[in-house]
Amino acid sequence: MRTMTNLEYRFVLSELEQLVGNRLDKIYQIGGKEFRLKFRGKDVTAVLGERIHFTKYIKDAPEEPNQFVMLLRKYLENAKV
């Protein structure tokens, strides 16, 4: 499996710079390593180590979040970037 390089992370960070000052509403775990971060007005999809990008296409999240996602929500919900 291919992972992101430092150069790719650099370009991703410049793209995600528009989130600075925004607040995180919710975190969803879509699959094993796939997460959805819902910010006010923007949605970000992240597959750990592979990609991270803005999205308009929202995948359905499980009805009940697992314990890891609940822990992330507890500490990161409404956090400012």
Image: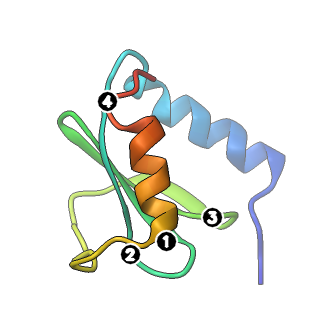
Residue drawn at the location 70% of the way across and 44% of the way down: 9
Q: What's the CA distance linking mark 1 and mark 4?
A: 20 Å
- Relative vertical location of residue 59 with respect to residue 28 in this rendering, above or below: below
Give neighbour class at mark 4: few <14, some 14-19, many 20+ (Cα, 10 Å).
Answer: some
- Give how far across and how far down residue 11 sits, in percent: 63, 39
**Nearer-N-terminus badge (1/3):** 1
- Give how far across and how far down residue 42 sits, in percent: 25, 41
- Relative vertical location of residue 19 with respect to residue 25 in this rendering, above or below: above
For the residues bearing labels 1 and 3, Cβ distance under 8 angstroms:
yes
Image quarter for residue 29?
bottom left
- Give how far across and how far down residue 36 sits, in percent: 37, 59
Find numbered disc 1 in the image and state the secondary structure of the residue it sits on: strand
Picture disc at residue 30:
2
Q: What's the CA distance linking mark 4 and mark 2?
A: 20 Å
Amino acid tagged 1? Glu
Picture disc at residue 34:
1
- Give how far across and how far down residue 19 sits, in percent: 39, 27
Q: What's the CA distance linking mark 2 and mark 3?
A: 12 Å
For the residues bearing labels 4 and 2, Cβ distance under 8 angstroms:
no
**Nearer-N-terminus badge (1/4):** 1
- Relative vertical location of residue 80 with respect to residue 78 in this rendering, above or below: above
Amino acid tagged 4? Asn
In the depicted view, which residue is nearer to us: 61 or 65? 65
Picture disc at residue 48:
3
Picture disc at residue 78:
4
Picture disc at residue 42:
none
Residue drawn at the location 52% of the way across and 63% of the way down: 68
